[in-house]
Image (cartoon, rainbow, N blue to C red):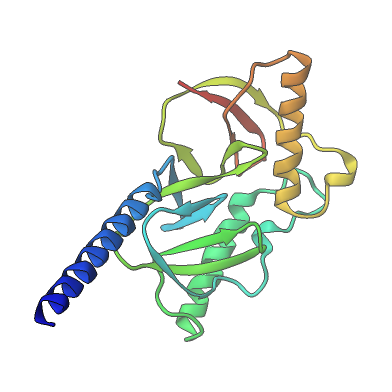
Amino acid sequence: MEKRIKYLLLFVSLTVIAFLQSTVSLYAQEEIIPDAIAEKISGVPVFLYCKPVSPYKVLGKAEQRMEILLMDIEEYTSVRKKAELMVTSAKDRVKTGLLDNFDAILVDTESSKTYAITFTSENSLKAKAQQVRNISVFFFSKPVNEYDVIAKLPARFPKYDENGLLQDKVKSMINRALRKVKSGDIIKFDGIIFNPDDLSATIIKFK
């Protein structure tokens, strides 16, 4: 009986060890490699079209409305000015007790919401760029890896795309660049860097 218990304990121990090893291996495989460095707006890191690599916790809304993503009829709306207003709004919410002190702001383009976040470990600007149609988008961020500039495109959008969301303009610019690839005007590219002041774009290919 005692011998059977020993064998059972040995089996359980080996099973637990195997599980822990597989879990560690899984986390190692899922480790996110940063490919972007976020920019600071009014002293606060803003993660737009990218997500922090360091673990973080959402504290609440950065602003009541997602003004940073709303585009006016003027197609050259400065997103930088909107970001500055967003940061000011978040700081005001801290002063009025609606929000705890935060480390950065995350703009979720999928849900069209802005969040104030605090890092739970390393306070870092490292980020993972969001992809649109398999193209890495850099907005208020710069690539980590070296690259060549393929082309520069001015901010020009279809008439129907002058209103709406920032996401619409980003997709429109990427589609425009992809059409240029199809027509042979430019070579295939990996990423697009947006100028937040006038929405012009730099098309890049990583080395």
Q: Quadrant of residue 174?
A: top right
Residue at x 31% of width, y 51% of height: 25
Image check: 55 left or right of 107? left
So how many labels did they put on this image? 0
Pinpoint residue 11: horizontal percent, then vertical percent. 22, 67
Q: Nearer the viewer, residue 114 or 41?
A: 114
Query: In the displayed image of the protein, which residue is found farthest to the bottom?
Result: 97
Residue at x 59% of width, y 60% of height: 108
**Quadrant location of the N terminus in the rendered image:** bottom left
Query: In the displayed image of the protein, which residue is found farthest to the top?
Result: 184
Residue at x 57% of width, y 60% of height: 107
Residue at x 75% of width, y 54% of height: 165
Q: Quadrant of residue 178?
A: top right
**Quadrant location of the C terminus in the rendered image:** top left
Q: Nearer the viewer, residue 137 or 25?
A: 25
Q: Is residue 22 above or below residue 35?
A: below
Q: Is residue 178 above or below residue 46?
A: above
Q: Is residue 23 above or below residue 172?
A: below
Q: Nearer the viewer, residue 98 or 49?
A: 49
Query: In the displayed image of the protein, which residue is found farthest to the right?
Result: 160
Image check: 170 left or right of 160? left
Pinpoint residue 182: horizontal percent, then vertical percent. 76, 19
Pinpoint residue 98: horizontal percent, then vertical percent. 51, 84
Query: In the displayed image of the protein, which residue is found farthest to the left?
Result: 2
Q: Quadrant of residue 195?
A: top right
Pinpoint residue 78: horizontal percent, then vertical percent. 66, 48
Image check: 152 left or right of 126? right
